[in-house]
């Protein structure tokens, strides 16, 4: 059967086909631009976790930083800015950090990691302690407000000032045996009769505290039967062992266990021998708690100090 087609109808069909093809090509060419216009931002400009990092505080020597590369899917690491102002970064080594912000340093590390190790690296750096002062001391035991005290930027902080700032002694405090524990000292604990000093009004021998010091006020009727638990435990303080024998791991559990960054395999037990000489031993409490082997779990004595250090990557310089 023969169908007759008018010339004008054939021309219209051809023109319609051409216009349809041109419109489709234009739509494909403009689709990405339309998408950007609808979202309002490009992919590169979209907010990320890194964009929210602190960009105000300039890092100082001694600052502690929590570091993580999201793409590694590993736990956070605790890093410290060393005496040379450097940070030891996994895979990269020494990176200058002093004077930079957390955000600026994170983007610098990101750039270096993406050279050889990652196609894309999301680097998160945050300050674990905002020590934007001369440091902090901790006051625990028989004071009315246990906790941290800031050392002012323009003046020292003395032992008596720290006690007063903590609300003063409680009624059960042994004011004659106030201990100051300092890290890295030959004799880490100094005992002070602060009560006599305050009563006399002579503060010439008032101790000046340093960043990281721990002030411990014992309870009067328990002063001779307590052990000191300091460092990376959830509830540092004084614990009475009167009337019973306690092992080191048991006292750690009394202090509510280790914190996240605790060095569990090298817990320091500081004691005194029969001659009154200081002794220090390292105990792998992690192995004791994990395996249940109590043969290497030492008995603690009144006056002993249990110090749990934090594990971190840092330089010694």
Image: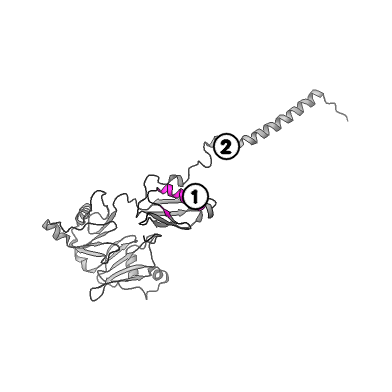
Whether residue 303 is situated above or below residue 49 in the rendered picture:
below
Q: Residues within 10 Å of mark 2 (few under 14, many from 20)?
A: few
Please provide percent x and percent y for residue 77: 43, 57
In the image, residue 38 above or below residue 9: below
Work out which residue is located at the far left of the displayed protein and give it. Answer: 200
Task: Please rate how many residues cluster around mark 1, counting C-alpha atoms within 10 Å: few if below 14, some from 14 to 19, many from 20.
Answer: some
Numbered circle sitting on residue 14? none
Number of numbered discs overlaid on the protein picture? 2
- Look at the numbered disc 2 and give the secondary structure of its residue: helix
Q: Is residue 164 left or right of residue 259?
A: left
Q: In the figure, is residue 28 to the left or right of 219?
A: right
Residue drawn 24% across and 73% down? 277
User: What main secondary structure does the magenta stretch of the protein show?
Assistant: helix
Query: Residue 35: which disc?
Result: 2
The magenta-colored residue range is 95-113
Q: Which mark is residue 111?
A: 1
| Res 300 quadrant in image | bottom left
Instruction: For the C terminus, give its image quadrant.
Output: bottom left
Q: Residue at x 27, y 59 (%)?
A: 214
Percent x, y for residue 205?
16, 59
- Judge by depth and name the residue closer to the eye, 193 or 299: 193
């Amino acid at each position: 059967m023969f169908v007759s087609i008018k010339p004008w109808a054939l021309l219209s069909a051809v023109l319609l086909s051409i216009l349809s093809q041109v419109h489709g090509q234009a739509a494909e060419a403009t689709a990405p631009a339309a998408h950007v216009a609808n979202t309002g931002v490009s992919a590169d400009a979209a907010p990320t976790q890194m964009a929210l990092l602190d960009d105000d505080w300039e890092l100082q020597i001694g600052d502690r930083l929590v570091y993580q590369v999201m793409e590694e899917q590993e736990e956070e690491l605790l890093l410290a800015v060393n005496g040379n102002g450097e940070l030891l970064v996994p895979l990269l080594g020494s990176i200058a950090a002093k004077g930079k912000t957390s955000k600026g340093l994170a983007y610098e590390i990101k750039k270096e990691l993406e050279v050889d190790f990652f196609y894309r690296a999301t680097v998160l750096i945050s300050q674990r302690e905002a020590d934007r002062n001369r440091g902090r001391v901790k006051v625990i035991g028989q004071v009315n407000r246990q906790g941290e005290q800031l050392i002012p930027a323009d003046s020292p902080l003395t032992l008596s000032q720290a006690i007063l700032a903590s609300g003063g002694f409680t009624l059960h405090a042994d004011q004659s045996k106030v201990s100051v524990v300092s890290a890295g000292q030959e004799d880490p604990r100094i005992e002070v009769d602060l009560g006599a000093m305050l009563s006399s009004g002579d503060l010439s021998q008032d101790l000046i505290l340093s960043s990281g010091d721990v002030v411990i006020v014992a309870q009067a009727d328990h002063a001779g039967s307590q052990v000191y638990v300091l460092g990376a435990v959830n509830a540092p303080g004084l614990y009475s062992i009167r009337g019973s024998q306690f092992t080191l791991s048991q006292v750690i559990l009394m202090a509510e266990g280790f914190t996240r960054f605790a060095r569990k395999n090298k817990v320091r037990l500081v004691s005194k021998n029969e001659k009154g000489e200081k002794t220090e031993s390292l105990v792998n409490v992690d192995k004791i708690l994990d395996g249940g082997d109590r043969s290497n779990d030492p008995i603690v004595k009144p006056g002993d100090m249990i110090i749990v250090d934090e594990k971190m990557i840092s330089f010694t310089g």
